[in-house]
Amino acid sequence: MSTTPPRTRPRSPLASPVRVAGAAAQLAALGVVGPVVFTILITLLSVGVSLVLVLGVGLLFLLAFVYALYALGWLETARIDGLYGFGLPVRRPRRSPKPGFGGFVHTVWLQFIDPGMWRGVANAAIATILGLVVLPLIGVFAGGIVLAFSPLFAGSGIVALGRTGIDVAVAWAVPAGILASVFALVAIAGLAILHGVIARAIMVPSREAQLAEAARTSNVQRAGAVRAAEVERTRIERDLHDGVQPRLVSVGMTLGLAQQKVATDPAAAKELIAEAHTSTKAAITELRQLARGIHASVLDDRGLDAALSALASRSHIPVGLDVRLSARCSPTAEAAVYFVIAESLTNAAKHSRASECRVLVREREGGMLWARVEDNGIGGAHVTPGGGLDGISHRVIGAGGTFRLDSPVGGPTTVEVSVPCAS
């Protein structure tokens, strides 16, 4: 998901003096900076399109164009939310779940069609136009003040009203200057208020849109949770059928043979009982590992850091663990991240031929729990239906997070997840 959920705040008064002054100042700044920014965007687009067939050079300009749009949308969202306190969702880059170069291209496309980004760009364009109107009005305001005081230094004759080309007799300079300044000030305030109204209409999702997005997100999370549960159930059944069940059957057969030999060959019966005892302990160990795969009790007792430390100590390949968390997250979020890391380390040990892994866990802006697992193996990992990566990806989606796998052939393999801490 590309954004964090919107924060609910009461609507702020757009016409408060502080906000009107702030909006006017920002519009004036946009009147200067905005044309330069949009000139750069248009240049990147035109050069990219014109050179796209020249050894693909134009693609680099088009890529820069897409991410320049994203940067503008992100800055505009932050500017509007900082000015008016609408509680806008934090813009986040969209990421494709697909691996490799195809995933990178898909990521760029998802970013290009992000509606939130385009809303920010549209609002910036309108604000730039309003800023181009505000700049001369500021000149009129300043010229009116100068005109009002012109009798003190002009003596007699005609005085020009700055930025307008209008000449005023000195006898009428004071009222004309005051009138011009008041008119310009009122116009600037009106444009500042209009800016707030337009920004609210463009940037703030409607109640219906918020409900629709919440319903869509809920459906995605429910489908992910159902799919994760199905994959987990299949894994448990497979582990029981292929591991513990045959071992317990073997224990039963061994004990049956021992029972038959107790009277005729006590020594052989003793060896069979010892063999059954060893197999029973192995079965208990497998059941413990299976139970740990279902739920890691250390998560509840000591938290994610301790659980990951125990996980790293049991890994068959060296693990560099770096966890920096200031507080506990919800059990759902911690469990999702834990099992992502556990499955990633298991896959690395089984398939990647890696000699080491690195695990990073951090708190991110917006109340997100972020984790990254990277190994130096041969790569080529991909999500297959019913596989371990399929299960953990849907588990992360079910917790309201995002899952990303990057595993080009030749390595390295990187798994990256973000989960809402309060999920």
Image (cartoon, rainbow, N blue to C red):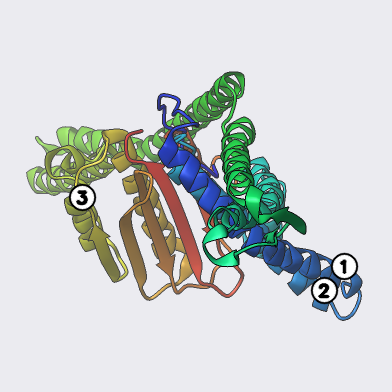
Left-right relation of 173 to 253: right
Can you tell which mark lies on residue 95? none
Residue located 26% across and 35% down the image: 331
Q: Position of residue 309 (x, y in %)?
A: 20, 58
Residue 288 location, quadrant: top left
26 or 91: nearer the eye? 26
What amino acid is found at the position of numbered circle 1 in the picture?
Val
Q: State how far apart marks 3 and 1 are (Cα).
A: 52 Å
Left-right relation of 123 to 327: right
In the structure shown, which secondary structural element does the residue marked by tag 2 occupy? Answer: helix
Residue located 71% across and 54% down the image: 168
What amino acid is found at the position of numbered circle 3 in the picture?
Ala
In the structure shown, which secondary structural element does the residue marked by tag 1 occupy? Answer: helix
What amino acid is found at the position of numbered circle 2 in the picture?
Gly
In the structure shown, which secondary structural element does the residue marked by tag 3 occupy? Answer: helix
Pointer 1 with pointer 2, Cβ within 8 A = yes
Q: Quadrant of the C terminus?
A: top left
Name the residue carrying label 3.
307
Q: State how far apart marks 3 and 2 are (Cα).
A: 49 Å
Label 2 crowd bin: few (<14), some (14–19), many (20+), radius 10 Å: many
- Inspect this view and state whether residue 343 appears: yes
Name the residue carrying label 2.
58
| Above or below: residue 31 compared with residue 375 | above
Name the residue carrying label 1.
49
Left-right relation of 360 to 348: left
Q: Position of residue 310 (x, y in %)?
A: 19, 55
| Above or below: residue 27 compared with residue 20 | below
Q: Which of marks 2 and 1 precedes in the sequence? A: 1
Left-right relation of 342 to 238: left
Q: State how far apart marks 1 and 2 are (Cα).
A: 6 Å
